[in-house]
Image (spheres, rainbow, N blue to C red):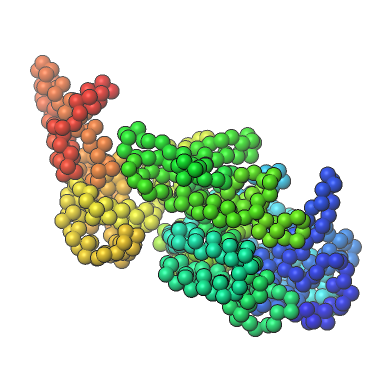
């Protein structure tokens, strides 16, 4: 490659700077106005897809003109143009990656193929290339001074389009240089009748809507695979780093790789290893080596190990942000360290729930808003029974990330934060394992977008999701290999999932998202209110069945049938461990299209016989198997006698209160003197007695004897 480029462009072209053109990272040393030495880095090997990676061996023909183009912008500017400063090339490089991904999909390799028709197609496809058909973000996160948060990027201001359109003008302006190097230039100016800024503004103005949540087809494998990687791979990551720090031989890596085979995430780890080994280029390394032969080079092993650490950081970030609904800025504010007494992260504390039954885990981090500065805030992580030693998976991720961070060389003046970024070795007094916790949202997002391809098999996705709100909503995901992913999608997915689990949680969702108004929270739910998320119903039913298998008693007519059939589920799962058993149960429900819907505070609906759903009979609606319960007509009175009703102990508080309230109301009516309203009083008393009787029957099925309810509880309820 070096010889071919020198032959095409000339030796003098590459001798204009002390920087080595052929390195994957160009490091420019400069002086800040404060007289501190600073470095500007251009990562040519840093990309989201193989198509847009300038150092991918398959892109030799693109590399022959694309990388020299940026070199020319620095040292050989086009006529009437000034040389660009290195720090100003970041936006152009972002535009180049988007353009190259699109060109690869259309099998375009050279500038002369960018005709007016192709440019028109690029402009039309650009909004989808950025973020499917989504647009302006309704909330922005500002992280540090001068940092452009990832959510600002997906806000789709005109600058997001400008950086990707202006590059076409730059390519055209270097036509003379391309021609001299024997590369056919663009045939005509890309935008003859409109300015780039004007076109960018028009594209930005046309995009309505908000960032969408992840589709089930993407969210399910994403969370499952990241959870497996975080929990299983932590000892491997620790040993890999330790081996590199000790300059262990190549055989140590092979031995470590052999230990992966017992993990569920072994294929993911192998894919990461191969991908990173193939994209690292070392001077004088022969072409055509296998990725294992490439790993024999110490420099390649060091770069690959660092890359695997980045992928691990990405998995932890996806889990914590997606399971807690954090903003990117809040995620980056999580503190580093483990408390020696509790063995929990120092950013996590516990409280006992009001009923004394659960241990609640809380996260303390920094809430950062655009106009109000920052303040310490609290998020709920999860809860377990007070006597349980289990931890929510988000806490496991933070603990594992602390273990990785303990092997890194942090700078003394860095804040004690958990999400870190590698510093470049050789540019200052640091080492190759020097890291900084002064991470940015855009930097972390770059990690995550490169990693998501390993957690979701985009090639196997259908063109359209089951819950699609527009046609072929997964096509752009497949074509970009996840490049359209944005961290804010995890926040939206959290809000949608929690709301569809139980709409009565809307106030809790508002608190968790740290929204000042409920209207903003409903904005996060958006059009998702009009659809049922299959993920929620599948997980509700699998969790319910697993609870019954482990001894919980269900109530309700459908609940009792489920209890009677539980031996069939036990036969299905056999001796599988809890996680594998849960997966088998969920798969059985998906294959047989069995769904469970939440009915709010009073129970669940399992429409095995949809025609028998009382709420739909009352409403006169049809096709209940698709719609789920009729929300306008479901009520405790309707559901308690329905053949589709399921009640579990987690909903028992509602029925205890209902029994107490109706029992007391019936007693009060019985002691009142009879008068002219005797008939109405009798009807009302009968209604209260029937409600109390139905509540007592359901509670009895749960194993709760209403005669043994504490008297204090009854008296307090009477007072209220």
Depth check: 536 or 1 in front?
Answer: 1
Residue 563 visible in the displayed image = yes
Q: How many numbered badges does the structure rendering display?
A: 0
Depth check: 145 or 695 in front?
Answer: 145
Q: Is residue 263 left or right of residue 603?
A: right
Q: Position of residue 668 (x, y in %)?
A: 15, 21
207 versus 358 height, above or below: below
From the image, which quarter does the C terminus lie in? top left
Depth check: 504 or 441 in front?
Answer: 441
What residue sits 57% from the left and 39% below the top?
367
Q: Is residue 668 left or right of residue 392?
A: left
Please tell me in which quadrant of the rendered image residue 678 appears: top left
Residue 509 visible in the displayed image = no
Q: Is residue 332 left or right of residue 691?
A: right
Please tell me in which quadrant of the rendered image residue 303 appears: bottom right
Q: Position of residue 52 (x, y in %)?
A: 65, 69
Q: Is residue 341 left or right of residue 150?
A: left
From the image, which quarter does the N terminus lie in? bottom right
415 versus 134 height, above or below: above
Please tell me in which quadrant of the rendered image residue 249 appears: bottom right
Q: Position of residue 9 (x, y in %)?
A: 84, 77
What residue sits 60% from the left and 39% below the top?
368
Q: Position of residue 480 (x, y in %)?
A: 57, 67
What residue sits 88% from the left and 60% below the top?
82
What residue sits 17% from the left and 42% below the top?
703
């Amino acid at each position: 490659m070096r010889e071919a480029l020198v032959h095409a462009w000339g030796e003098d072209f590459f001798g204009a700077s002390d920087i080595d053109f052929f390195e994957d990272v160009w490091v420019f040393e400069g002086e800040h106005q404060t007289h501190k030495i600073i470095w500007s880095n251009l990562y040519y090997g840093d990309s989201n897809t193989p198509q847009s990676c300038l150092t991918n061996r398959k892109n030799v023909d693109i590399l022959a003109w694309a990388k020299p183009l940026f070199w020319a912008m620095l040292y050989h500017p086009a006529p009437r143009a000034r040389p660009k400063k290195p720090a100003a090339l970041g936006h152009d490089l972002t535009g180049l990656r988007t353009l190259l991904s699109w060109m690869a999909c259309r099998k375009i390799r050279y500038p002369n193929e960018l005709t007016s028709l192709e440019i028109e197609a690029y402009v039309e496809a650009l909004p989808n290339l950025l973020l499917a058909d989504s647009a302006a973000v309704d909330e922005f996160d500002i992280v540090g001074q001068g940092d452009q948060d990832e959510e600002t990027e997906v806000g789709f201001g005109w600058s997001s389009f400008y950086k990707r359109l202006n590059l076409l003008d730059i390519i055209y302006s270097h036509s003379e240089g391309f021609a001299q190097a024997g590369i056919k230039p663009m045939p005509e100016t890309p935008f003859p009748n409109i300015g780039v800024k004007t076109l960018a503004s028009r594209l930005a103005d046309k995009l309505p809507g908000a960032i969408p949540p992840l589709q089930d087809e993407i969210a399910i494998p994403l969370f499952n695979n990241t959870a497996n990687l975080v929990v299983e791979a932590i000892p491997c990551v620790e040993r890999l780093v330790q081996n590199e720090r000790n300059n262990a031989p190549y055989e140590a890596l092979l031995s470590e790789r052999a230990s992966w085979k017992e993990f569920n995430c072994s294929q993911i780890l192998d894919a990461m290893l191969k991908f990173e080994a193939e994209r690292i280029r070392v001077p004088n390394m022969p072409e055509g080596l296998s990725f294992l032969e490439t790993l024999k080079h110490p420099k390649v092993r060091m770069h690959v190990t660092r890359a695997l650490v980045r992928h691990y950081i990405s998995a932890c970030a996806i889990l914590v942000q997606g399971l807690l609904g954090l903003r990117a800025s809040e995620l980056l504010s999580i503190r580093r360290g483990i408390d020696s007494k509790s063995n929990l992260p120092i950013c996590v504390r516990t409280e006992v729930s009001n009923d004394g039954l659960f241990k609640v885990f809380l996260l303390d981090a920094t809430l950062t808003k655009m106009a109000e500065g920052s303040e310490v805030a609290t998020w709920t992580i999860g809860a377990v029974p007070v006597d349980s030693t289990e931890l929510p998976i988000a806490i496991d991720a933070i603990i594992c990330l602390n273990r990785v961070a303990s092997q890194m060389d942090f700078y003394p003046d860095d804040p004690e934060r958990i999400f870190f970024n590698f510093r470049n070795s050789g540019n200052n007094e640091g080492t190759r394992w020097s890291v900084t916790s002064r991470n940015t949202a855009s930097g972390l997002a770059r990690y995550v977008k490169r990693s998501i391809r390993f957690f979701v098999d985009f090639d196997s996705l259908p063109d359209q999701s089951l819950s699609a709100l527009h046609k072929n909503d997964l096509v752009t995901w497949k074509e970009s290999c996840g490049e359209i992913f944005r961290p804010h999608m995890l926040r939206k997915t959290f809000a949608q999932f929690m709301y569809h689990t139980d709409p009565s949680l809307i106030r809790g969702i508002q608190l968790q998202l740290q929204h000042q108004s409920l209207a903003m929270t409903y904005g996060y739910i958006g059009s998702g209110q009009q659809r049922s998320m299959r993920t929620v119903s599948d997980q509700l039913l699998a969790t319910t069945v697993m609870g019954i298998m482990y001894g919980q008693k269900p109530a309700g007519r459908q609940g009792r049938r489920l209890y009677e059939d539980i031996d069939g589920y036990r036969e299905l799962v056999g001796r599988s461990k809890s996680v594998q058993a849960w997966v088998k149960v969920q798969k059985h429900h998906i294959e047989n299209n069995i769904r469970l819907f939440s009915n709010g505070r009073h129970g669940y609906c399992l429409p095995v016989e949809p025609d028998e759903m009382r709420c739909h009979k009352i409403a006169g609606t049809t096709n209940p198997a698709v719609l789920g319960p009729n929300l306008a007509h479901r009520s405790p009175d309707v559901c308690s006698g329905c053949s589709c009703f399921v009640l579990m102990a987690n909903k028992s508080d509602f029925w205890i209160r209902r029994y107490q309230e109706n029992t007391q109301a019936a007693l009060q009516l019985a002691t009142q003197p009879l008068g002219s309203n005797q008939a109405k009083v009798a009807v009302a008393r009968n209604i209260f007695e029937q409600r109390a009787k139905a509540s007592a029957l359901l509670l009895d099925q749960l194993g709760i004897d209403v005669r043994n309810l504490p008297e204090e509880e009854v008296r307090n309820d009477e007072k209220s």
